[in-house]
Image: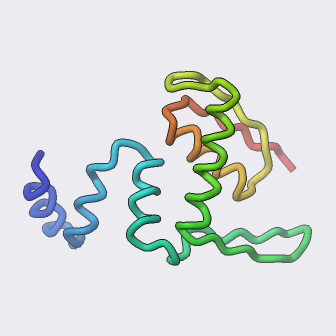
Amino acid sequence: MTTEALITQAHGFGQTAADALLVEATSLGALLAQHAAAQPDALFLRYFDDDAGVTSDYSYAQFWDAVRRTAAALHARGLREGDCVASLSHNHPLAAALLFAGWTIGLVVAPQNVAE
């Protein structure tokens, strides 16, 4: 489907032309990169730490930076496109960064959440 067709189709569903262009991203990592470039200071993630009673906000640019650094670390450890990775963690922004990092470099990621 062409970009023009996507834009036309998206307008029928109340989306903007910019929203339609995002459909062309090849992965969730690519989609995040597009948003980080288009709106770096916009809020991407808000995390409330029950134990500490603290809320942390992450902009698209901050989160994309964490994803890029995590992806580089995974790659440096020899992980390549198509490799499978499992993670075991609590709900946390770094766990989300690990997911996006894996998707960004083409890993198959199987997240497991630790029951509290």
In the image, residue 50 lies at what x, y percent? 85, 69
The x, y position of residue 58, in whole percent, is 63, 70
Q: Residue at x 60, y 61 (%)?
A: 63
For residue 57, which quarter of the picture?
bottom right
Q: With respect to residue 115, does 81 lie above or below?
A: above
Q: Is 102 in front, or is 111?
A: 102
Residue in view at x 56 percent, y 58 percent? 64
**How many numbered tags mark residues here?**
0
Q: Tell me: 25 left or right of 97.
A: left
Q: Where is 29 relative to 54, above or below?
A: above
Return the x and y of residue 35 as percentages of the image width and height. 42, 64
Farthest-out residue, front: 76
Give percent across and percent down for residue 51: 91, 68
| Quadrant position of the N terminus in the picture | top left
Left of 27 or right of it: where is 69? right
Residue nearest the viewer, comparing 30 with 48: 30
Camera-side residue of 78 and 89: 78
Q: Quadrant of residue 86?
A: top right
Q: Which residue, as the protein is rendered here, is positioned at the far right?
A: 51
Residue name at image x 44 percent, y 56 percent: 33
Its colouring scheme is rainbow
Residue located 50% across and 26% down the image: 81
